[in-house]
Image: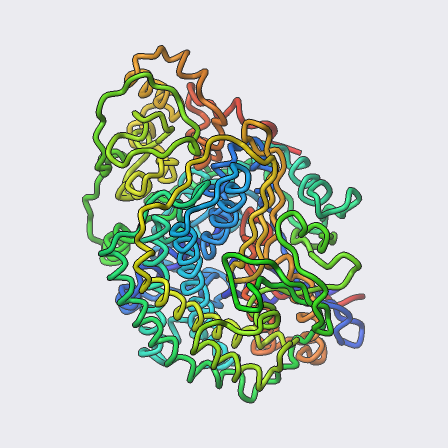
């Protein structure tokens, strides 16, 4: 057996391998997306005081710590039976929006755009955000400015830009001051302006790109509030592979809809619908389940997106555009929430007294997809069981099949060129996979592409 | 000037903290080339002749260790960036259970998997324990923080690039905290969910387990200022780091006892979940474990499979 390793490639959060198996004619026999590490948060949270979950779990991921922070906090609200006051809910939504603005702009401008703007054949040394800064300095500056707003928003509401800590059982630890609100509101207007300008680039990004690349047919799952796009609260809708709605769930009912399985060759679990159908989450899935975004410019962008991809799209590369539609919606929502004077209210925490429910399930839409934190505690509020369902596990099947689809197209005579390897990565990158989240990972997972020739 | 950022067992948050230099990042890349950083660029291996390499994350498997040794060989200056690199970080909490217990739980015991679920074997195994990078190789500089804060990285990174010396605060989190001690009466330890702390007085004095006094600063006391007790994410204060007979747990007990006039033995009875409340960021550090008075050895269950 001959092994060819084309070594760590990147621009995803965390690290993974691609292993391609070739037959004796040098054609692709099969290919897999392989994740080679595990961190074990689900296990090592047992024995922890439940109120520690919202400040330990952000450390699962440095790109989307807020999602884990808020999913865990929502679970603790249920366990202590405390409903956050209205202002606290708004602050949490705004905190989640800060996360989206940072994460989506990071992915779109800094991780994915170099492929489309500089081209997938551009040399690896320059095919990155720094190369982009030299090629399009104005764009890079705008990307930096808008991501900075996302991080400033997170810091103001969450206490810190990375690994926020202000959400706790029953609400938030601190209100937003009027001075801070005014400062952020000005930044939000600027961010929205940049987002709308960027749409001119985003809308053309997939022009001339074969969107059948990495295609796979699956069901979808995403949160929606009566058909309106929602990322902090609401039931999660489930679509089958034909785009038909097969139900929706909240809380512990998630276990009626989904199941996990694993393979010998990857630490990353797979999630599918009970009954065996695979599904996807994240920007593409969320746009597939909603009727509208609920904000003016994002709805206009959604209409344009749907003209090209339809109401329910299966195209993996469409994730990139769907993500941008969400980015616009996030900026618009930030402007709206920050212009609401109620956001500076000081009633932000309902005091907790004791454990009321032994189990709490916090569900939120993380930038990469539906995130579920499920905790069971004893009477003293010490965690006994913990189950975390994260976006990238739910997209694992689609990424894995997408990799094989592209490998079949680009591997020629048993060889993989640099540009072709990057095309495989482009499909992986479309999902913006977060490997640290997905495996709650320990250690480094370089995304290597390995060609294995079967004897 | 060639800069690299290596990722070991961590969350990528420290690399995001570097991106959080925001517009200053453009000045940095004007003066120095970032030649390797897996999260943001496609170069596959760290090249030879790196001037400054930042290593983030802990060491939890053999590949982390190889990566650490490689970046050490290829870099003139190696900087441990962030609390995972400096003290193991939350990855160290995995030592509360055996490797077999972790695998069995994740793949066979959570509610959404089946009891006959596949435990992957065609994947790299863990090392027998977690390590901070300084436990295994020579480190030139340590920058703690989970992650290090923007205001300090904006001073440290340009100084490293230009070779300048810096004089930064070496004080604990309390030094940056604006709370007053006030009178402490009828002290009992509270769980963090209990009641709502007032914004004026010391959180520890109010009964909340705030680790500010035993934790290295340079965070602006962000959590106490937001009415959240310190969790110790910057790692131990300098006195604890330097003195073999001082440890996070022991110093907290002494501090509470001094504050409340309760005997240390009584204080110890009130403490709960020591692993996740006192050692979540340092449990993987050999330096912290090897202290004679450390409680880490009692907490770690099994280190080999």
Location of residue A334 with respect to B301 vertically, above or below = below
Residue sitting at 41 percent across and 47 percent down? A85
Q: Which quarter of the figure has residue A399?
A: bottom right
Query: How many circles with numbers are drawn on the protein?
Result: 0
Residue sitting at 52 percent across and 58 percent down? A366
Residue B244 visible to the viewer? no
Describe residue A59's horizontal placement relative to residue B263 as left or right. right
Location of residue A438 with respect to A100 vertically, above or below = above
Which residue is most to the bottom?
A208
Question: Quick one: quadrant of the N terminus of chain B?
Answer: bottom left
Q: Which quarter of the figure has residue A265?
A: bottom right
Residue sitting at 33 percent across and 56 percent down? A342
Q: How is the image coloured?
A: rainbow
Describe residue B165's horizontal placement relative to residue A232 as left or right. left
Location of residue A300 with respect to A400 vertically, above or below = below
Instruction: Give residue A390's position: percent from left, percent from top.
Output: 59, 54
Question: Quick one: quadrant of the C terminus of chain B?
Answer: top right
Q: Nearer the viewer, residue A79 or B6?
A: A79
Q: Nearer the viewer, residue B9 or A5?
A: B9
Location of residue B245 with respect to B139 vertically, above or below = above
Residue B280 visible to the viewer? yes
Instruction: Give residue B113's position: percent from left, percent from top.
Output: 73, 47
Instruction: Give residue A176's position: percent from left, percent from top.
Output: 30, 52
Residue sitting at 54 percent across and 62 percent down? A368
């Amino acid at each position: 057996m001959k092994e060819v390793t084309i070594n760590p490639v990147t621009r995803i959060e965390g690290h993974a391998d691609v292993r391609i198996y070739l037959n004796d004619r040098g054609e692709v026999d099969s290919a897999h997306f392989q994740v080679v590490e595990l961190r074990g948060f689900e296990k090592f949270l047992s024995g922890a005081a439940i109120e520690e979950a919202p400040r330990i779990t952000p450390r699962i991921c440095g790109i989307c710590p807020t999602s884990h922070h808020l999913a865990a906090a929502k679970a603790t609200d249920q366990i202590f039976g405390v409903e956050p006051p209205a202002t606290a809910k708004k602050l949490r939504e705004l905190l989640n929006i800060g996360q989206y603005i940072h994460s989506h702009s990071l992915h779109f401008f800094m991780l994915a755009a170099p492929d489309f703007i500089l081209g997938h054949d551009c040399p690896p040394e320059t095919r990155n955000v720094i190369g982009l800064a030299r090629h399009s300095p104005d764009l890079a500056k705008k990307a930096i400015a808008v991501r900075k707003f996302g991080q400033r928003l997170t810091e103001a509401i969450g206490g810190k830009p990375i690994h926020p800590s202000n959400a706790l059982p029953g609400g938030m630890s601190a209100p937003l001051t009027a001075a801070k609100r005014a400062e952020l509101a000005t930044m939000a207007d600027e961010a929205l302006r940049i987002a709308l300008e960027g749409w001119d680039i985003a809308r053309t990004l997939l022009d001339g790109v074969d969107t059948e690349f990495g295609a796979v047919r699956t069901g979808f799952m995403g949160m929606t509030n009566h058909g309106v796009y929602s990322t902090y609260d609401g039931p999660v809708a489930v679509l089958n592979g034909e785009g038909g709605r097969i139900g929706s769930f909240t809380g512990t009912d998630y276990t009626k809809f989904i199941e996990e399985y694993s393979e010998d060759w990857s630490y990353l679990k797979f999630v599918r619908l009970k009954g065996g159908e695979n599904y996807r989450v994240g920007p593409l899935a969320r746009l597939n389940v909603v009727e509208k975004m609920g904000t003016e410019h994002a709805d206009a962008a959604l209409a344009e997106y749907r003209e090209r991809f339809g109401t329910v799209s299966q195209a993996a590369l469409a994730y990139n555009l769907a993500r941008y539609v969400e980015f616009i919606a996030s900026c618009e929502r930030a402007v709206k929430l920050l212009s609401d004077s109620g956001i500076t209210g000081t009633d932000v925490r309902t005091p907790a007294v004791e454990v009321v429910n032994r189990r709490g399930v916090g569900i939120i839409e993380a930038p990469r997809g539906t995130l579920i934190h499920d905790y069971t505690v004893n009477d003293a509020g010490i965690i006994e069981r913990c189950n975390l369902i994260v976006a990238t596990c739910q997209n694992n099947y689609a990424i894995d099949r997408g990799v094989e689809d592209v490998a079949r197209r680009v591997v020629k005579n048993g060889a993989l060129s640099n540009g072709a390897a990057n095309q495989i990565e482009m499909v992986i990158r479309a999902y913006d996979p977060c490997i640290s989240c997905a495996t709650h990972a320990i250690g480094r997972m370089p995304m290597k592409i390995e060609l294995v020739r079967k004897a | 000037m060639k800069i690299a950022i290596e990722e070991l067992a961590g969350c990528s948050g420290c690399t995001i903290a570097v991106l959080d230099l925001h517009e200053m990042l453009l000045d940095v890349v004007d003066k120095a080339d970032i030649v390797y950083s897996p999260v943001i660029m496609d170069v596959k291996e760290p090249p030879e002749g790196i001037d400054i390499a930042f290593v983030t994350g802990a060491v939890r498997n053999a590949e982390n260790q190889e990566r650490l040794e490689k970046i050490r060989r290829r870099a003139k200056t190696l900087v441990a960036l962030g609390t995972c690199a400096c003290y193991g970080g939350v990855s160290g909490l995995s030592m509360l259970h055996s490797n077999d217990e972790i695998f069995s739980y994740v793949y066979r015991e959570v509610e959404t998997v089946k009891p006959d679920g596949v435990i992957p074997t065609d994947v790299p195994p863990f090392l027998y324990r977690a390590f901070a990078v300084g436990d295994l190789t020579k480190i030139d500089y340590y920058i703690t923080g989970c992650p290090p804060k923007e205001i300090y990285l904006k001073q440290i990174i340009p100084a490293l690039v230009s070779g300048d010396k810096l004089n930064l605060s070496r004080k604990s989190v309390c030094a940056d905290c604006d709370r007053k001690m006030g009178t402490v009466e009828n002290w009992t330890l509270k769980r963090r969910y209990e009641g709502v702390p007032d914004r004026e007085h010391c959180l520890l004095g109010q009964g909340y387990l705030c680790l500010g006094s035993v934790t290295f600063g340079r965070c602006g006391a962000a959590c106490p200022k937001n009415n959240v007790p310190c969790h110790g994410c910057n790692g131990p204060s300098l006195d604890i780091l330097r003195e073999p007979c001082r440890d996070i747990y022991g110093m907290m007990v002494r501090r509470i006892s001094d504050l409340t006039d309760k005997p240390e033995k009584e204080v110890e009875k009130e403490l709960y979940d020591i692993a996740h409340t006192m050692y979540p960021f340092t449990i993987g550090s050999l330096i912290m474990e090897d202290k004679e008075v450390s409680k880490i050895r009692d907490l770690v269950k099994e280190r080999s499979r």
